[in-house]
C-alpha cells in the first residue's frame, strides 16, 4: 500500500500500475510484454509458468485503469507498458523503476522487487484459497448434519 500511495503522490502512474499489476495478478516479470491492450480487454492472458501454461486473470478494476492509461498514452493496441522509444519495457527498466519507488516510499528494495510482489500475490492467494476451503468444509458439515437430523436411521424425525 505504501508503494502505491508513494507512486500516486509522485505522479508516477506507470510504476503505480506495474506494482498493482504484479500484486494483483502474480504476473512473472518476463511476461510483462504480454500485457497488451487486447489482453486487458479480454480480461487476462496466458503465460508460460513452470514448464506449463497458466492463465493470468486481470481484475476488472485494474483492467479499466490499464486501458485508461493506454488510451492517455496513445496506445490503441499492443503492449501497455512501453519505454521512451516505444519498445516494450525491459526487465531492468521495470526493476529500476520499482527500486526508485521503494527508496522514495521507505520500503526495503528486497521487499518491493517485482519477484517479491509476485510472491506476495501468491502467498495471499494461497491464504485465501485455504480459507475458502475451510468454509466449504464447514458448509458441507452443516449440510450433512441437517441431513443426518432429517433422515437418520433409528432416530425419530
Image: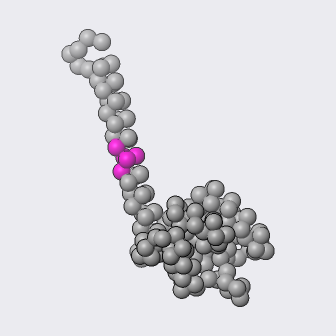
Q: In the figure, 68 relative to 157: above or below?
A: below
User: Which quadrant of the view contains residue 74?
Assistant: bottom right
In this rendering, would 102 be left or right of 148?
right
Q: Is residue 10 visible?
A: yes
User: Which quadrant of the view contains residue 97?
Assistant: bottom right
Q: Residue furthest left?
A: 154
Q: Is residue 39 visible?
A: no
Q: In the figure, 5 relative to 99: above or below?
A: above
Residue at image coords 34%, 30%: 142
Q: How is the image coloured?
A: one colour
Nearest the camera: 142 or 121?
A: 121
Residue at image coords 40%, 46%: 132
State whether the magenta stretch is mostly helix, strand or loop: helix
Please tell me whether residue 33 belongs to the stretch shown in magenta: no
Across and down, in percent, residue 151 comes to 30, 19
Q: In the figure, 113 relative to 130: above or below?
A: below
Residue at image coords 33%, 40%: 137
Nearest the camera: 134 or 5?
A: 5
Nearest the camera: 140 or 127?
A: 127
Which quadrant: the C terminus? top left
In this rendering, would 116 be left or right of 44?
left
Across and down, in percent, residue 149 comes to 30, 20
Across and down, in percent, residue 153 comes to 23, 19
Please tell me whether residue 133 belongs to the stretch shown in magenta: yes
Across and down, in percent, residue 67 comes to 71, 65
Q: Residue furthest top?
A: 156
In this rendering, would 150 be left or right of 14?
left
Q: How many marks?
A: 0
Which portion, as a residue range, is magenta?
A: 130-134
Amino acid at each position: 500500500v505504501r508503494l502505491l500511495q508513494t507512486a500516486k503522490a509522485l505522479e508516477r502512474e506507470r510504476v503505480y500500475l506495474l506494482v498493482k499489476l504484479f500484486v494483483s495478478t502474480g504476473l512473472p516479470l518476463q511476461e510483462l510484454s504480454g500485457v497488451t491492450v487486447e489482453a486487458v480487454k479480454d480480461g487476462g492472458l496466458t503465460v508460460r509458468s513452470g514448464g506449463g501454461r497458466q492463465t493470468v486473470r486481470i481484475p476488472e478494476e485494474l483492467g479499466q485503469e490499464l486501458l485508461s492509461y493506454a488510451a492517455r498514452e496513445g496506445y490503441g493496441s499492443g503492449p501497455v507498458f512501453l519505454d521512451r522509444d516505444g519498445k516494450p519495457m525491459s526487465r531492468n527498466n521495470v526493476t529500476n523503476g520499482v527500486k526508485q519507488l521503494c527508496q522514495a516510499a521507505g520500503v526495503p528494495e528486497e521487499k518491493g522487487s517485482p519477484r517479491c510482489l509476485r510472491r506476495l500475490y501468491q502467498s495471499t492467494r494461497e491464504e485465501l484459497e485455504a480459507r475458502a476451503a475451510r468454509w466449504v468444509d464447514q458448509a458441507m458439515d452443516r449440510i450433512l448434519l441437517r441431513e443426518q437430523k432429517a433422515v437418520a436411521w433409528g432416530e425419530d424425525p
